[in-house]
Image (cartoon, rainbow, N blue to C red):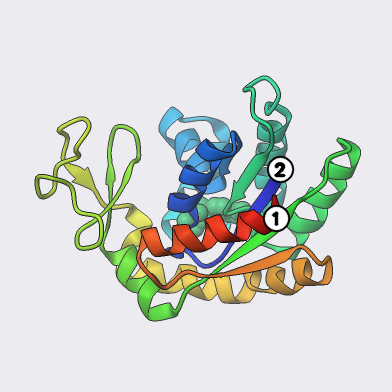
Amino acid sequence: MNLIFLGPPGAGKGTHAEVLSKTKNLCHLAAGDILRRNIKEGTSLGMEAKDIMAKGELVPDMLVNSMMFAEIKMLKVKGCEGFILDGYPRTIGQAEELDKFLASEKMTLTAAINFDASEAVVVERLSGRRLCAVDGKIYHVKNMPPKVEGICDCHGQPLVTRKDDQPETIRKRLAVYHESTKPLIEYYARKGILRNVQADGDAPLVQEKIAKLFEKVG
Ligand code: AMP
């Protein structure tokens, strides 16, 4: 099963991709996480992406496409039965290149799941989001707090806020979403593979909706 998770930043794509990838033995390929890993490791891709990401803008298609294609090529080696693309594609250009790449690999997309979340909910989630500095596990100051305030449950380290989760950058990322990424909803609807999930509710509620959807999708 090969899935795309669509939706604005803060819609819960990462959280739900993490759960579903485990239950369905899929590789969770989160473009933002892979880019952040490249920044941490100081690769040339990371160096090109760093300032762009800090501003909430999009990394050029060509760079992200080749990064994601390399990840998809590793699926079998990793023993995954498919993938969840989380935060990729983010432009029509990326989606078209992905189609060509998948055709060349004789792979197909099973579904594009659109996480439909309102602007108010998304802003609240992003501004309260905190991460474990060691493994990137996601917390939220109100909705998913750690056992001890400000400290990650697994490693006992202070939680961090992503640079691009600052209010001004959140606004920029949402504007970029509306302009460049939202048209993908129509793109996948026309292909007949779009599925909508109302994602404003708490994580367990949304998870139930996803589980129901997969009773149908397979
Ligand atoms: P995310 O973790 O998905 O919120 O992504 C964080 C940032 O990484 C975005 O704001 C972009 O700067 C960059 N990024 C992630 N995915 C893509 C993509 N598919 N195309 C271009 N830039 C991306």
Q: Position of residue 192 (x, y in %)?
A: 81, 67
Q: Position of residue 40 (x, y in %)?
A: 41, 33
Check if mark 1's residue and mark 2's residue have beta carbons within 8 Å.
yes
Label 1 sits on what residue type?
Answer: Val
Residue 36 vertical position relative to residue 56 in the rendered view, above or below:
above
- Residue under circle 2? 1
Q: Residues within 10 Å of mark 1 (few under 14, many from 20)?
A: few
Q: Position of residue 70 (x, y in %)?
A: 70, 32
Quadrant hosting residue 29? top right
- Could you tell me if residue 59 is visible in this image? no
Q: Residues within 10 Å of mark 2 (few under 14, many from 20)?
A: some
Label 2 sits on what residue type?
Answer: Met
Q: Who's the residue at 76% across and 57% down the image?
A: 95
Q: Position of residue 171 (x, y in %)?
A: 41, 74
Q: Who's the residue at 19% across and 37% down the image?
A: 153
Does mark 1's beta carbon lie closer than 8 Å to ligand 1? no
- Say what secondary structure mark 1 lies in: helix
Horizontal side, residue 146 vs residue 211: left or right: left
Mark found first going from the N terminus, 1 or 2: 2
Which residue is situated farthest in the left direction here?
148
Q: Which of 116/33 is in front?
A: 116
- Say what secondary structure mark 2 lies in: loop
Residue 77 vertical position relative to residue 129 in the rendered view, above or below:
above
Q: Which of 214/195 is in front?
A: 214
Horizontal side, residue 82 vs residue 207: left or right: right
Circle 1 or circle 2, nearest the eye: 1
Quadrant hosting residue 158? top left
Quadrant for the N terminus in the image: top right
- Residue under circle 1? 217
Horizontal side, residue 148 vs residue 171: left or right: left
Q: CA distance from mark 1 to mark 2?
A: 9 Å
